[in-house]
Amino acid sequence: MSRIDWSRFDLDELAEELRDTQPGPDTERMIWAFERALVAARADEQLLDYLLAASTCLTAASTGQSPREVLERYFRRSVSDQVWRDRYLPLFA
């Protein structure tokens, strides 16, 4: 069972945090992506795994990289575990 009630999840606080801490156009693209992923999560939470795999493969194909290379690139760019726990995870509660 999910730890998040997707039907009640409100993206507004997360969107506000992203706008306050991230640069312009990329932020709006990220919020757009979150909105689409939230639709999928509300339909069936397991779709999130499929969206991740599909997005990774599409990105790999469009950049000439392998899916592993795509994931490693994003891993290196991701926030630390501590920042995730302190800043972002509470926004999903």
Image (spheres, grey):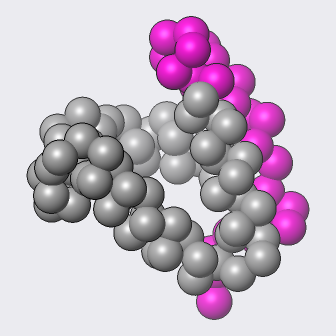
Most foreground residue, 57 or 82: 57
Residue drawn at point x = 64 percent, y = 57 percent = 37
**Residue 73 part of the magenta-drawn span:** no
Q: In this view, does 8 lie to the left or right of 93?
A: right
Residue 93 falls in which quadrant of the image? bottom right
Residue at the location (69% across, 31% down)? 15
Q: Does the magenta stretch include residue 4?
A: yes
Q: Residue at x 52, y 41 (%)?
A: 88
Residue 51 locus on image (x, y percent): 51, 66
Instruction: Identify whether 56 is placed above or below 32.
Output: below
Whether residue 75 is visible, yes or no, is: no
The answer to whether residue 59 shows anywhere in this view is: yes
Where is residue 12? Give x, y as percent. 79, 35
**Placement of 5 over or under 73, stated as above or below:** below
Q: Residue at x 68, y 37 (%)?
A: 32
- Residue 80 in the image, given as x and y percentages of width and height: 26, 39
The residue lying toward the viewer, choosing from 7 and 35, is 35
**Magenta residues (range):** 1-28
Query: Which residue in the rendered view is the most extreme toward the top?
Result: 24
What is the count of numbered marks?
0
| Residue 55 place in picture, x, y as percent | 43, 57
Which sits in the foreground, 82 or 24? 24
Q: Judge whether 3 appears above or below 56 on screen.
A: below
Q: In this view, does 29 lie above or below 32?
A: above
User: Residue furthest toward the bottom?
Assistant: 1
Quadrant of the image for the N terminus?
A: bottom right
